[in-house]
Image (spheres, grey):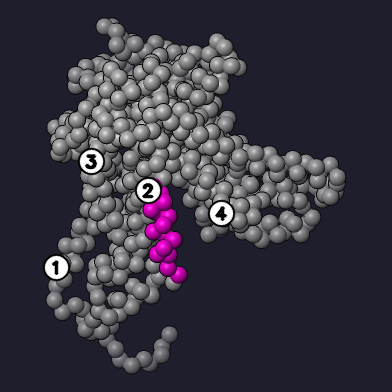
């Protein structure tokens, strides 16, 4: 295939090496650096802001107490934290096997470049970019109402599982692709079937890469709030979930609820809960990076 | 070709390699894998059906044309009007602000990382920038409302509404910088270094090489990054719900509060609506419009990415 784009034709060699150009070159480089820096500075300001604002409430009571509307000083996030753990637990149980099996199919079994594979591929790419609130609509119409699961932990988990499925599939495929061809060939040559090869050779070899992708996708699910707004998490909840069909709230939703309260103490509380949420996400990211660095194998 | 090869009967060879016993387990596993891969297709079908069916009911009561061109959105009133333009204009206003922030900054960051930064600098700055993409949107919403509006913007614009389009748009722009930057950078990294070497050999500077050679060569990927970034801005919910307010308003003043398509869905859906009510159905009609817009943009972006991959890989 020929090149479709070509350098502009107003490129004039006579311009080169002039002093004014040099100055403009430097300005240009600094502009580029500044555009990168603005994002990073905003990140730093955000982190400093939430930590200083939430500082008075960064105590043990934040974790052990239940949310309270009357006295924010005594209020905590216990039910939201437990809700998040329940929801993410089921999300993982649902999304992991489906995502990994789907990736194995696409990478190891289906005809590469075949019609079904292409259809699923474009579909996954598109699903990865569908707004998360649309998944909330799906959860509301299908899981909450049509399947009558109501506003429960399992409705939230099913919805979030579908939401992160594309990410799990894409990252698992990449991990599988990194396993060299000759491992598969060796296994097949010894008489193993395709599934035995995938299950006993390729999958274990790709596990660190898969784990990294899975953890990152779960950390996305933990921070997700929009779809849960439609699935009943907004209700004021002062109990921990006790099963799949239990009512629930989650950390991001609890934060969202507090941002709507006019009293300043609730904003402090929201900031403290944000710090807790960010610490959890940071810890998950560190685990992911640790797994990747520790088990990185050079083939 | 008529080489007298040893007489191996193809058929016989194949028969001898054929498995001795039927591999039932293998067939079952294969079926399970196909089902897992089909879940994503079922998800799309589920999304489309769950949006379209209630929307059809909605549009049997509100004509499509009135929905698309109406300028008043009052679904809660007894004789509510369902003109979606205020929600569309709110979405466009906030998306436009986000785009003005994210496109130049994201592209600038991408050029810096791909063309200027040394390996060491790149190794530190790129993951740091990507941390931005991992911050939950509810946190950005809180930051937009509590810090950007209440601490910063009120100093510059004393008349600003506490809930306003400007703060939501600015923070959303910052949020999508990593999306724009990392996809643009991928596209620029895919440009063969021969093109750069040729440009340097002609005496071009680094800047000239970047702007006149690398960017044009990576253009389809860069545009794909822009399209995907804009699509994310249109679909983003929490920032606008928290920071831009919940008042549908057909206005072009970014200092005022506005409601977007997503924040309407979130606000109306959070209440416990009766299944048959017009308000309940209106969520799906707005979601249909949102889905069509973002779907079209995602498809354009996927096509563009495929194009630059075909050219260089």
Q: Chain of mark 3?
A: A
Q: Give the alpha-carbon distance from disc 3 to disc 2, as whole Å.
A: 16 Å
Q: Give the alpha-carbon distance from disc 2 to disc 4, as whole Å.
A: 20 Å
Q: Secondary structure at mark 2?
A: helix
Same chain shared by disc 3 and disc 2: yes
What residue is rendered at 27% in x and 26% in y? A67
Does the stretch in magenta take in A297?
yes
Q: Chain of mark 1?
A: B
Same chain shared by disc 3 and disc 4: no
Please state the extent of the stretch shown in magenta in the rendering. A283-298
- Residue behind mark 1: B24
Name the front one of labels 2 and 1.
2
Judging depth in this view, the residue of B167 and B108 nearest the camera is B167
Among numbered discs 3 and 2, the one appearing first in the sequence: 3
Give residue A84's quadrant in the image: top left
Q: Secondary structure at mark 3?
A: helix
Asked if B284 appears above or below B196 in the picture, the reply is: above
Q: Give the alpha-carbon distance from disc 3 to disc 4, as whole Å.
A: 36 Å
Measured as percent of width and height from the top left, residue A223 is found at 36, 38
Dot 2: few (<14), some (14–19), or many (≥20) neighbours within 10 Å? some
Name the front one of labels 4 and 1.
4
Dot 1: few (<14), some (14–19), or many (≥20) neighbours within 10 Å? few
Q: Chain of mark 4?
A: B
Judging depth in this view, the residue of A256 and B198 nearest the camera is A256
What residue is rendered at 48% in x and 18% in y? B164
Picture disc at residue B123: 4
Give residue A131's quadrant in the image: top left
Name the front one of labels 3 and 1.
3
């Amino acid at each position: 295939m020929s090149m479709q784009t070509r350098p502009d034709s107003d490129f004039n060699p006579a311009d080169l090496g002039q002093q004014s150009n040099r100055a403009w070159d430097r300005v240009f480089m600094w502009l580029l650096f500044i555009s990168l820096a603005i994002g990073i500075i905003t990140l730093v300001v955000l982190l400093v802001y939430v930590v200083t604002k939430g500082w008075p409430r960064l105590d043990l009571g934040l974790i052990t107490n239940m949310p309270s509307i009357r006295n924010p000083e005594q209020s905590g996030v216990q039910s939201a934290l437990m809700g998040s753990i329940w929801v993410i637990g089921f999300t993982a149980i649902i999304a992991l096997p489906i995502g990994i099996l789907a990736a194995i199919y696409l990478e190891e079994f289906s005809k590469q470049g075949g019609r079904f594979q292409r259809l699923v591929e474009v579909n996954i790419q598109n699903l990865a970019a569908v707004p998360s609130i649309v998944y909330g609509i799906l959860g509301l119409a299908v899981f909450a109402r049509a399947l009558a699961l109501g506003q429960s932990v399992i409705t939230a988990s099913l919805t979030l599982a579908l939401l992160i499925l594309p990410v799990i599939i894409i990252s698992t495929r990449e991990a599988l692709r990194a396993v060299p061809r000759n491992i598969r060939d060796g296994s097949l040559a010894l008489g193993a079937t395709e599934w035995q090869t995938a299950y006993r050779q390729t999958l274990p070899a790709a596990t660190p890469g898969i784990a990294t992708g899975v953890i990152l996708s779960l950390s996305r699910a933990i921070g997700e709030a929009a779809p849960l707004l439609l699935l009943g998490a907004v209700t004021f909840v002062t109990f921990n979930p006790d099963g799949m069909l239990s009512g629930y709230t989650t950390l991001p939703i609890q934060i969202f609820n507090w941002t709507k309260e006019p009293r300043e103490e609730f904003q402090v509380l929201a900031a403290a809960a944000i710090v807790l949420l960010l610490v959890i996400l940071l810890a998950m990211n560190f685990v992911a990076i640790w797994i990747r660095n520790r088990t990185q194998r050079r083939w | 070709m008529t080489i007298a090869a040893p007489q191996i009967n193809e058929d016989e060879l194949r028969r001898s390699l054929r498995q001795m016993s039927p591999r039932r387990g293998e067939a079952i596993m294969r079926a399970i894998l196909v089902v897992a891969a089909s879940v994503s297709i079922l998800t799309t079908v589920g999304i489309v059906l769950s949006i379209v069916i209630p929307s059809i009911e909605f549009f049997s009561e509100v004509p499509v044309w009135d929905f698309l061109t109406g300028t008043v959105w009052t679904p809660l009133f007894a004789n509510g009007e369902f003109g979606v333009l205020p929600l569309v204009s709110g979405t466009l206003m906030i998306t436009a602000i986000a785009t003005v922030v994210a496109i130049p900054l994201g592209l600038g960051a991408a050029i810096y990382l791909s063309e200027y930064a040394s390996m060491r600098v790149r190794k530190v700055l790129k993951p740091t920038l990507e941390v931005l993409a991992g911050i939950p949107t509810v946190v950005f919403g809180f930051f937009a409302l509590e810090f950007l509006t209440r601490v910063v913007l009120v100093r510059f614009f004393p008349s600003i509404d506490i809930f306003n389009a400007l703060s939501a748009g600015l923070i959303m722009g910052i949020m999508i910088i990593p999306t724009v930057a990392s996809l643009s950078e991928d596209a620029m990294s895919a440009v063969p270094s021969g093109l750069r070497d040729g440009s340097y050999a002609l005496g071009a500077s680094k800047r000239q090489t970047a702007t006149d050679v690398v960017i044009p060569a990576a253009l389809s990927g860069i545009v794909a990054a822009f399209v995907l970034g804009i699509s994310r801005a249109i679909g983003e919910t929490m920032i606008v719900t928290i920071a831009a307010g919940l008042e549908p308003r057909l206005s072009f003043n970014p200092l005022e509060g506005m409601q977007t398509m997503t924040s309407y869905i979130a606000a109306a859906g959070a209440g416990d609506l009766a299944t048959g009510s017009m308000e309940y159905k209106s969520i799906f009609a707005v979601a249909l419009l949102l889905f069509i817009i973002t779907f079209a943009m995602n498809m354009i972006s996927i096509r563009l990415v495929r194009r630059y991959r075909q050219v260089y890989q």
